[in-house]
Amino acid sequence: MTQCQIGKVALIDNDIIMVDIESGTEIGIEHIYEFQNAAIDLVNAHKKLYSIVSYGAYSMPTKEAREFCGRDRFNDKYILGRAIVVHGLGQMIITRHTLKQRKSKVPTRIFSDAKNAKIWVNNLRSKNNDYQLIHDVI
């Protein structure tokens, strides 16, 4: 686990990056870069991963951070699935809007608790592993 300025980044089961953002913080572009660099330090940067991002209550990204996330597709080639945990209607609205801007092909879901997000990521991972096993046999 790596402690960052406004949260923590951890590696779960060798292929899930968990970003836990503290409550009541304003998330800027510099924080996004810090989280990305911490994740790269935890794993090989060219490994495909799943991600769970948990926003703390009353945490909001700045306008610049939302715009950056809406257009940043660099990480899409390294992410197999993305779960986002929000704690309120305001976070839900902003997250939906940002995801619509992004138009990513990566499976993404929004959750209200981390437990359901982890279950979804684990189900997605097991489906991908089953597909990979079939693909390798053919």
Image (spheres, rainbow, N blue to C red):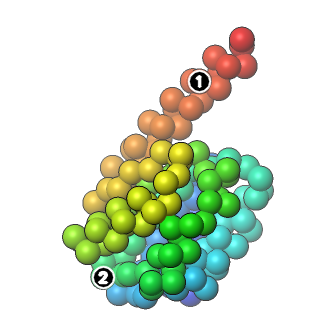
Q: Nearer the viewer, residue 108 or 25?
A: 108
Residue beneath the point at 77% across and 53% down: 46
Q: Crowdedness of circle 1 by 10 Å Cα count: few (<14), some, many (20+)?
A: few
Q: Mark 2 falls on what kind of element? A: loop
The amino acid type found where label 1 is placed reads Tyr
User: Which residue is the site of mark 2?
Assistant: 58
Q: Is residue 40 above or below residue 34?
A: above
Across and down, in percent, residue 117 comes to 38, 52
Across and down, in percent, residue 74 comes to 67, 60
Q: Nearer the viewer, residue 111 or 65?
A: 65
The amino acid type found where label 2 is placed reads Tyr
User: Which residue is the site of mark 1?
Assistant: 131
Q: Crowdedness of circle 2 by 10 Å Cα count: few (<14), some, many (20+)?
A: some
Q: Mark 1 falls on what kind of element? A: helix
Residue beneath the point at 72% across and 65% down: 40
Residue lying at the far left of the rendered structure: 89
Across and down, in percent, residue 135 comes to 67, 19
> Can you tell which mark lies on residue 31?
none
Distance between the Cα atoms at labels 2 and 1?
39 Å
Across and down, in percent, residue 53 comes to 46, 64
Q: In which quadrant will I find the C terminus? A: top right
Residue beneath the point at 59% across and 24% down: 131
